[in-house]
Image (cartoon, grey):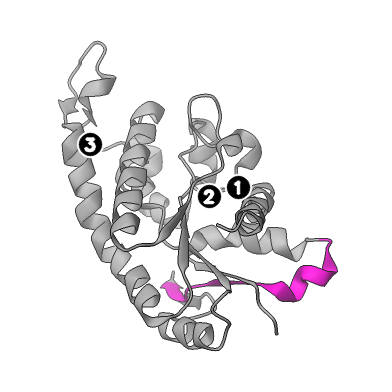
């Protein structure tokens, strides 16, 4: 198989798989491969490939293969989607301060830099083991629509009582996402991993994920976004990125 684009990652690969499955250009079908890392979820093993298997497969491909990472990305939702029992905010969002604990913006940045350093180890291991250059996609921003989130949340958020605790105020979730993006770009730059920015056209005027790109859950983007991202990847290749 002549693979020109190889995409790997975690749950954010699903929208890309659906978009590629319905791609009408049959001549390109053999040029792209999209895989999801294996893991155990709710007692069942899901996914396609381990890190070791991925490295072995990349060793068989040409150095010019465009390799794209969609690893991680949901850390901001894990931290901020569910309203914490002790309400908190950051200084830039203070209007009329109530009972919220004010956390400095730098503290959020340091939290993501330290927390995501462990996630970056996996990506760094892959980068150091293969001859291709690694490109990493910035994860989708949060969804603003609280009603959608409460109706469509995943099992893990149910276990953490999202219904009882509620959803964190959207603009705080957006600010926390921005800290994650900062950490992602900082760590990737340190590892000499190329960044593929989240497509601006998939954000609303405030920076949230546009509703037209909502997947039927609390955190992920849909097949339409998958097509948009694939188009962006093609454009980068065409431009010689």
* Local crowd size for mark 1, using a 10 Å CA cut-off: few (<14), some (14–19), many (≥20): some
Judge whether 54 appears above or below 25 on screen. below
Judge whether 94 appears above or below 34 on screen. above
| C-alpha gap between disc 1 and disc 2 | 5 Å
Marking on residue 215: 1
| Percent x, y of residue 190 | 28, 59
Q: Is residue 22 magenta?
A: no
Horizontal side of 159 relative to 205 (left or right) equals left
Mark 1 or mark 2: name the one nearer the start of the chain. 1
Q: Residue at x 78, y 61 (%)?
A: 23
Marking on residue 89: none
| C-alpha gap between disc 3 and disc 2 | 25 Å
Q: Tell me if residue 56 can be seen.
A: yes
* Residue at mark 2: 220
Horizontal side of 225 relative to 118 (left or right) equals right
> Are circles 1 and 2 on residues that touch, CB within 8 Å?
yes
Numbered marks: total? 3
* Residue at mark 3: 85
Mark 1 or mark 3: name the one nearer the start of the chain. 3
Q: Residue at x 58, y 74 (%)?
A: 65
For the C terminus, give its image quadrant: bottom right
Secondary element type, mark 1? loop
Q: Nearer the viewer, residue 111 or 190?
A: 190
> Are circles 3 and 2 on residues that touch, CB within 8 Å?
no
Q: In the rendered structure, which segment of residues is drawn in magenta?
A: 24-40
């Amino acid at each position: 198989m002549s693979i020109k684009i190889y995409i790997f990652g975690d749950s954010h690969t699903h929208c890309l798989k659906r978009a590629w499955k319905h791609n009408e250009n049959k001549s390109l079908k053999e040029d792209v491969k999209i895989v999801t890392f294996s893991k155990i979820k709710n007692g069942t093993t899901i996914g396609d490939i381990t890190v070791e298997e991925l490295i072995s497969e990349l060793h068989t491909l040409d150095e010019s293969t465009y390799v794209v990472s969609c690893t991680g990305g949901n850390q901001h939702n894990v931290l901020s989607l569910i309203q914490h029992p002790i309400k908190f905010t950051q200084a830039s969002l203070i209007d009329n301060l109530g009972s919220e604990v004010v956390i400095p913006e730098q503290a959020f940045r340091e939290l993501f830099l330290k927390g995501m350093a462990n996630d970056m180890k996996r990506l760094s291991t892959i980068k150091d083991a293969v001859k291709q250059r690694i490109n990493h996609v910035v994860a989708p921003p949060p969804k603003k629509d609280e009603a959608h989130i409460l109706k469509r949340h995943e099992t893990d958020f149910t276990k953490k009582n999202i219904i009882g605790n509620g959803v964190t105020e959207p603009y705080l979730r957006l600010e926390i996402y921005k800290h994650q993006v900062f950490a992602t770009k900082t760590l990737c730059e340190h590892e000499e991993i190329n960044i593929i920015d989240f497509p601006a056209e998939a954000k609303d005027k405030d920076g949230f994920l546009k509703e037209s790109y909502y997947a039927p859950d609390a955190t992920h983007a849909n097949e339409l976004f998958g097509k948009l991202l694939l188009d962006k990847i093609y454009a980068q290749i065409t431009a010689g990125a």
